[in-house]
Image (cartoon, rainbow, N blue to C red):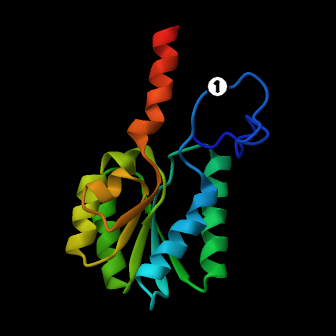
């Protein structure tokens, strides 16, 4: 499940109600914290790029995610550059654009396709000399500067237990 609150599937994560069972890892509300962490690591940060998969989730979820990063960037006084990626090869050209436009750091938005490419993205960010933060713990494991978000294997364990009990 991507963003059950933004998609009106549940009232809140703390009290979902209804008959929905599952986990989520998107957390649009974590975007501001990721930008804040980048700011702490790169104190002179003024220009940040957000690498995002344009069609990763529902239109409502994507709007909530983009709104969250735009508000967070504005609050922190950062100039935001959106770097869209439709497919796995799009981020290579996105990084070339970031370097050309003097981006100082990169935030990876939550996305299944970007998660699958974390190793390549971490390497590309390092080679581009751009500090980057991922949305899941595995990004740092693959050589990215840092991550703030769910550990996906830990998140999957309860789901595996649910399925084995069925």
**Residue at position x 70%, y 41% in the image:** 13
In the rendered structure, the answer to whether residue 126 lies left or right of residue 91 reads left
In the displayed structure, 86 sits above or below 147; it is above
In the rendered image, is residue 48 in sight? no
Helix, strand or loop status at disc 1: loop
Q: Nearer the viewer, residue 122 or 36?
A: 36
Q: Position of residue 9 (x, y in %)?
A: 73, 34
In the rendered structure, the answer to whether residue 73 lies left or right of residue 112 reads right
Q: Position of residue 21 (x, y in %)?
A: 64, 25
| Label 1 Cα neighbours within 10 Å, binned few <14 / some 14-19 / many ≥20 | few
Outermost residue, bottom side? 44
Q: Nearer the viewer, residue 141 or 51?
A: 141
Q: Nearer the viewer, residue 95 or 147?
A: 147
Q: Position of residue 17 (x, y in %)?
A: 79, 30
Q: Quadrant of the N terminus?
A: top right
In the rendered structure, the answer to whether residue 45 lies left or right of residue 28 reads left
**Residue at position x 29%, y 74% in the image:** 96
In the displayed structure, 64 sits above or below 47; it is above
**Residue at position x 64%, y 58% in the image:** 29
In the rendered structure, the answer to whether residue 60 lies left or right of residue 46 reads right
Dividing the picture into quadrants, the one containing residue 122 is: bottom left
Q: Position of residue 53 (x, y in %)?
A: 46, 53
In the rendered image, is residue 54 in sight? yes
The residue where tag 1 is placed is 21
Dividing the picture into quadrants, the one containing residue 65 is: bottom right
Q: Nearer the viewer, residue 100 or 126?
A: 126
């Amino acid at each position: 499940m991507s963003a059950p609150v933004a998609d009106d599937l549940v009232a809140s994560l703390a009290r979902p109600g209804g008959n929905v069972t599952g986990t989520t890892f998107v957390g649009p509300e974590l975007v501001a914290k990721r930008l804040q962490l980048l700011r702490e690591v790169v104190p002179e940060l003024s220009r940040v790029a957000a690498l995002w998969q344009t069609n990763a989730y529902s239109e409502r979820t994507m709007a909530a995610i983009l709104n969250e990063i735009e508000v967070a960037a504005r609050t922190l006084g950062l100039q935001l550059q959106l770097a869209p990626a439709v497919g796995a090869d799009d981020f290579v050209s996105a990084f070339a654009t970031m370097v050309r436009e003097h981006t100082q750091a990169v935030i990876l938005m939550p996305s299944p396709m970007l998660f699958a490419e974390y190793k390549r993205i971490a390497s590309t960010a390092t080679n581009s000399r751009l500090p980057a933060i991922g949305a899941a713990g595995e990004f740092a494991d693959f050589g990215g500067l840092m991550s703030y978000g769910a550990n996906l294997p830990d998140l999957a364990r309860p789901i595996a237990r649910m399925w084995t009990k069925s």
